[in-house]
Image: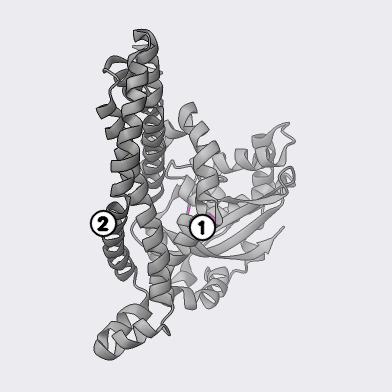
Amino acid sequence: MDFFGSINIITVVLIGLVAVPVLIGVVSPFSSYRMQRLLGSLLNSLIFLASIILSVYLTTHFLYDTQSPLLTKLFKVIPSFYSLVTSRDIWSFVIVAAILTALLSGLLYLLTMPVYRFVIVPLTDKISSAMGRMNGVVRRILGGIWELPKAAILVVICALLLNFYVSYNGNSTLEKSIDASGAYQYIDKTILDPLLSSQWAQKIPVLLGDSFKQAAESLEARNIHLIRYFNGMTLGDAVKSNADIDAKAKSIVGKETDQKAKAKLLYTWVAKNIDYDSKKAAAVAADSSRVASGAVVAYDTRTGICFDYSCLYVAMCRAVDVKVRFVTGLGYSGTEWGDHAWNQVYDPAGNRWINVDTTFGSSGRSYFDRAGFDADHQYAVVQGEW
């Protein structure tokens, strides 16, 4: 029972996605038909991927370049189309992109049919004929190797789906399994992190954020309001510490000297020991002037909202000489965007600022130096640095 209890289900799934296709390749006869089917499947996957990329690119320009001759003519014929396009609503983007994806997929499929018929089919026939003269064991080994590209694609797709699921829906049990999976962490470090941190990927959340244009346009004023909306308390007062907080921070980091490691230890403590106060959030929305807030309040009550989490994290970081920032912007809760506060800590070894969200981290999901952090955090404004 202990053995089965120690098995990480995420690792098992990822290994299975590699092992099953390879085993099928070893067991099944290696034939030209099988090669044609696999290459055809890979070609169709490339066509679909290319269609998505092209449709997103074209849709972005289509919805943003309102001065184009094509749009100008459409606006004259269908006046209501102007408000749909200029609003940059996310659903209009999705609909246009989906239509373009379908059209481009069909067009690219027609264009690549000669490639499949006159290149792939003859090539696989020759390869199959040559392999037919090989030793049976060698053929089975090559059959397994032949399935590796397919297995790799399945693993990456699965890892991406897991990443997006925990980012937008939240599942603390699944998040813990993912964090404990060595296989997933390797994929995340070598593939997902570079992919989700790329400039192209980071433009996607910004595009989605345009659906909340009205909120974004008033963001600056709302951020100023956020700093003072607890009994008129300034940010400087809110992040003030006391002897108990300082002592606790020092005991948490112990003899650790690495700045990033110290920041991670403090993040873990705050995320695990401060509970989100939904009633306080409702009270703040109704009348913020009557709500006590800040680092000391959060530490004493062990509860708070994003403002309190972030203030306490600042106080603890300052106590152990970790450079820290207080940041405000928009956060996505899984159902909607709203005003939010989080932190950044400086990592001297990497010469960079690391995003940290102890509020979101309290749900069980990891939000310390998270890949794709910008997917649910937008319009960041640094309100203070210590």
SS of the residue at dot 2? helix
Picture colour scheme:
one colour
Who's the residue at 42% across and 53% down the image? 277
Q: Mark 1 or mark 2, which is nearer the start of the sequence?
A: 2
| Distance from Cα at disc 2 to Cα at disc 1 | 25 Å
Q: Residues within 10 Å of mark 1 (few under 14, many from 20)?
A: few
The residue closer to the viewer here, 129 or 301, is 129
Q: Residues within 10 Å of mark 2 (few under 14, many from 20)?
A: some
- Asked if one can make out residue 225 in the rendered structure from this viewpoint, the answer is yes
The residue closer to the viewer here, 250 or 50, is 50
Extent of the magenta region: 304-308
Q: Is residue 58 above or below residue 276?
A: below
Report x, y in % for residue 335.
33, 58
All told, the count of numbered labels is: 2
Q: Which mark is residue 200?
A: 1
Residue 384 located within the stretch drawn in magenta: no
Q: Is residue 235 above or below residue 175?
A: below
Q: Tell me where residue 51 sits by quadrant.
A: bottom left
